Amino acid sequence: MKPCKVAIIGSGNIGTDLMIKVMRHGKRVAMGAMVGIDPASEGLARAARLGVSVTAQGIDGLLALPDFGDIRIAFDATSAGAHAHHNAVLQAHGVRVIDLTPAAIGPYVVPCVNADQHLDAPNLNMVTCGGQATIPMVAAVASVTQVHYAEIVASIASKSAGPGTRANIDEFTETTSRAIETVGGATKGKAIIILNPAEPPLIMRDTVSCLTDDTDQAAIEAAVAAMVERVQAYVPGYRLKQRVQFDRIEQPVLVPGVGRRTGLKTSIFLEVEGAAHYLPAYAGNLDIMTSAALVCAERVAESVACGQPAVTASV
C-alpha cells in the first residue's frame, strides 16, 4: 500500500518532533511538507536538510506547493486560534486533519480509548498532553464502575511549554475537562496544569483522582494496569509511579458540579518520559501528543485511498 503523504503545519518543537516520528516510524504515512511562518525556523531548516518540501508562508504557502495535491492528511501543531482557519482551508481541499491544538473542532480522540470510533471524521482533535496522559486512566476506572467526578493535575517542565502551550492555558483546562467527561466517561471532570520551573527539568508527572461508588478495588487495579500497557504500545515511557491508591470517603464531601457524596476515591500517579527523538526526555508532555497523533494518522491512512487525488469540497 502506498504511504499517505502528510503535511505538518507548525515548525516548532511539536511539529519537528512529529516530523522525525513520521520519518522514523511511519508505516502508512510519509512526510510531504513542513509548514511554518518563520523563515529562520530551526524546524523548517531541519526539514529542508532531510529533503522535505518546506514553506514559510503558512497555509497559503502549503496550497502553493507543487506537490500539495499529494497531501491527504495534515497535522496542525500551531494554536487553537489559528486552527479554525487552517481547518476550513484544508477541508475545502479534501484533506483530513489531525489537530494537536485545543481548538476541539472535531471529536476528541485518545488512541487507546476511542480512536476506532472516529476514523471517518474529517477532523480529529488530540485533546491536550494532559488529556492524552490521564484520560486513559479515567476510562479504565469507568470500565469498572461509574466515575462521578474525575480531577487530573498535569505537571510539566516549564522548559517544555512553548509559546503555543502558554497561549492556550485556558483552552487546555476547558478542553481537557470536557474530554475527561466525553471520552473518559466521568460525570464531571476538572483539569489543572502546572508549569514547573525546577532545574534540572522534571519529567512530566500526572495525578488522576476519581470518585466512584465503593466497588471492587482489585478490578480497578487490573483495569488500570491493562490500560497502562495499551498506552505503552505507542508511548514506551508511560508508567505508573506507584500502586493505585484507594481511600473510602465515609463522610459526605461537596464535589464541584456533583453535590455531596460518599464513595471510593481512586488515586493514580503517572510519569511520562519522552522518547527523545528531537525533544529532551523530560518533555513527555509533548512526546505523548506527537505519538498519539502518529497513531491516529496511521489508522486514518488505512481508510484513505492515498494513490488517488483528494476530493475537493465546493466552497
Image: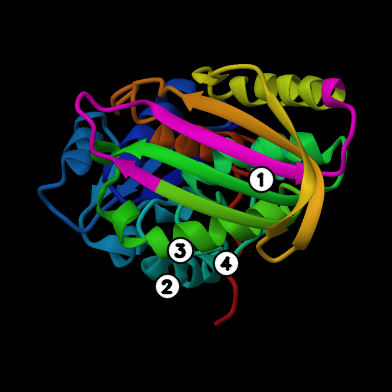
Q: What's the distance in space between the residues labelled 3 and 4, CA to CA?
A: 12 Å
Camera-near label (1 vs 3) is 3
Q: Which residue matches tag 4? A: 105
Asked if labels 1 and 4 touch by Cβ distance under 8 angstroms, the answer is no
Q: Secondary structure at mark 1?
A: loop
Residue at the image position 58 percent from the left and 31 percent from the top? 28
- Number of dots carrying numbers: 4
The first of marks 3 and 4 along the sequence is 4
Q: Quadrant of residue 306?
A: top right
Q: Is residue 26 left or right of residue 1?
A: left
Query: Quick one: 116 or 6, which is closer to the camera?
Result: 116
Tell me which segment is drawn in magenta.
194-218
The first of marks 1 and 3 along the sequence is 3
Q: Is residue 158 above or below residue 35?
A: above
Q: Which residue matches tag 1? A: 305
Residue 93 is covered by the magenta coloring: no
Query: Quick one: 265 or 300, which is closer to the camera?
Result: 265
Q: Is residue 204 left or right of residue 122?
A: left
Q: Which residue matches tag 3? A: 171
Q: Is residue 219 left or right of residue 92?
A: right
Camera-near label (1 vs 2) is 2
Where residue 143 sits in the image (x, y, percent)? 84, 37
The first of marks 4 and 1 along the sequence is 4
Residue at the image position 53 percent from the left and 40 percent from the top? 293
